[in-house]
């Protein structure tokens, strides 16, 4: 019996027009009537998520920043958070500056839409786009002095070349590295760096224990990208929308795209 449904947001539940289908909204309301726990698991920060998720949206929990924190939606209280300590943050800064990587250091939750950035000087249009989106919330990173605070995560904006990602990943230790496709240009690779163990799947596992020992086989999960892999591998009841990368569609059940109510199709297949 399915007790919890977890869906990614961008490219999965959210349409390409940044909207929700009436069919998917009806499905979410029906799940609530069935007392199934409804969870959105997104790479967005609480600030960014609030731009597309209304206050009265029919969910119970929001797993945000790829699993770095969890919000109980009924009262918007944060029930779980993680942080990188300042020593590890400085270690990562030193490495990335040395390797000429373009990156951002996100402040601790709940202010993790605010960040400090370092630009190597090489052309990086996607990096420029993110700076433009958050122009009121970002400032250049000051080098030469120790980074003073903990951080939610670092984000490195890389070219759409997996070899560059994996080469850089091999140089990192003591952290969790998550690959995501840029939501801005749909091509660039974002390397998200968190404390060890952080992922959508890990946070859902924490939430299951917090709520009373819900088992992986009692969860249904839907996603569309690489940063959903830990979540999709956590439960045997996993689905990918049709707009997911071909490489991933070989590993999971595929439903309709995010623009064709793939969320509802997954629920029809998994619950009926």
Image (tube, rainbow, N blue to C red):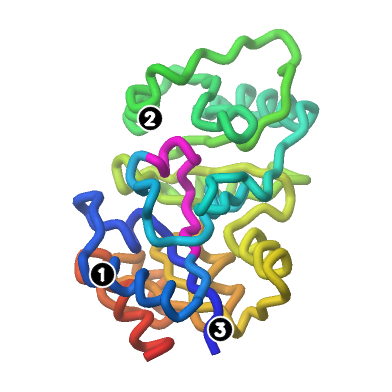
- CA neighbours of label 2 inside 10 A, class few (<14), some (14 to 19), many (20+): some
In the picture of the structure, the residue carrying the numbered disc 3 is 236
The residue tagged with tag 3: helix, strand or loop? loop
| Residue 90 visible in the snapshot | yes
Q: Position of residue 126 (x, y in %)?
A: 35, 33
Is disc 1 placed on a helix, strand or loop? Answer: loop
**Residue contact between numbered discs 2 and 1, judged by CB atoms under 8 Å:** no
Q: Nearer the viewer, residue 70 or 101?
A: 70
**Is 34 situated above or below 81?**
below
Span highlighted in magenta in the image: 39-50
Residue 45 included in the magenta stretch of the image: yes
- Image quarter hosting the C terminus: bottom left
**Residue 251 showing in the rendered view:** no
Crowding at dot 3, Cα within 10 Å, few <14 / some 14-19 / many 20+, comes out as some
Location of mark 1 (residue): 257
Disc 2 designates what residue? 130
Q: Residue 71 placed where, x, y %?
A: 57, 49
Q: Residue at x 50, y 30 (%)?
A: 113
State the separation of the CA atoms marked 3 and 2.
35 Å
Magenta highlight on residue 86: no
Residue drawn at (40%, 50%) of the image: 181
Looking at the image, residue 269 sits to the left or right of residue 38; the answer is left
Q: Quadrant of the N terminus?
A: bottom right
Residue under the image location 68 percent in, 49 percent down? 80
């Amino acid at each position: 019996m399915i007790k919890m449904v977890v869906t990614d947001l961008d490219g999965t539940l959210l349409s390409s027009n940044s909207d929700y289908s009436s069919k998917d909204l009806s499905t979410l309301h029906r799940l609530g009537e069935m007392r199934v726990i409804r969870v959105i698991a997104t790479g967005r920060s609480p600030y960014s998520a609030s731009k597309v998720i209304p206050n009265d949206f029919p969910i119970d929990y929001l797993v945000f920043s790829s699993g770095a924190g969890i919000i109980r939606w009924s009262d918007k209280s944060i029930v779980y958070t993680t942080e990188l300590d300042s020593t590890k943050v400085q270690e990562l800064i030193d490495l990335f500056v040395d390797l000429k990587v373009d990156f951002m250091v996100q402040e601790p939750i709940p202010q993790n839409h605010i960040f400090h950035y370092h630009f190597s000087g090489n052309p990086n249009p996607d990096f420029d786009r993110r700076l433009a989106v958050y122009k009121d919330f970002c400032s250049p990173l000051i080098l030469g002095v120790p980074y003073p605070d903990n951080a939610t995560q670092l984000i490195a904006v890389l070219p759409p070349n997996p070899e560059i990602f994996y080469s850089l990943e091999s140089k990192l230790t003591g952290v969790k590295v998550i690959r995501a496709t840029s939501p801005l240009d749909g091509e660039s690779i974002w390397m998200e760096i968190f404390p060890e163990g952080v992922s959508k799947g890990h946070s859902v596992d924490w939430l299951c224990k917090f709520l009373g020992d819900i088992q992986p086989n009692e969860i249904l999960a839907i996603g569309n990208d690489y940063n959903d892999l830990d979540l999709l591998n956590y439960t045997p009841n996993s689905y990918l929308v049709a707009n997911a990368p071909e490489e991933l569609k070989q590993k999971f059940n595929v439903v309709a795209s995010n623009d064709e109510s793939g969320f509802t199709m997954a629920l029809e297949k998994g619950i009926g």
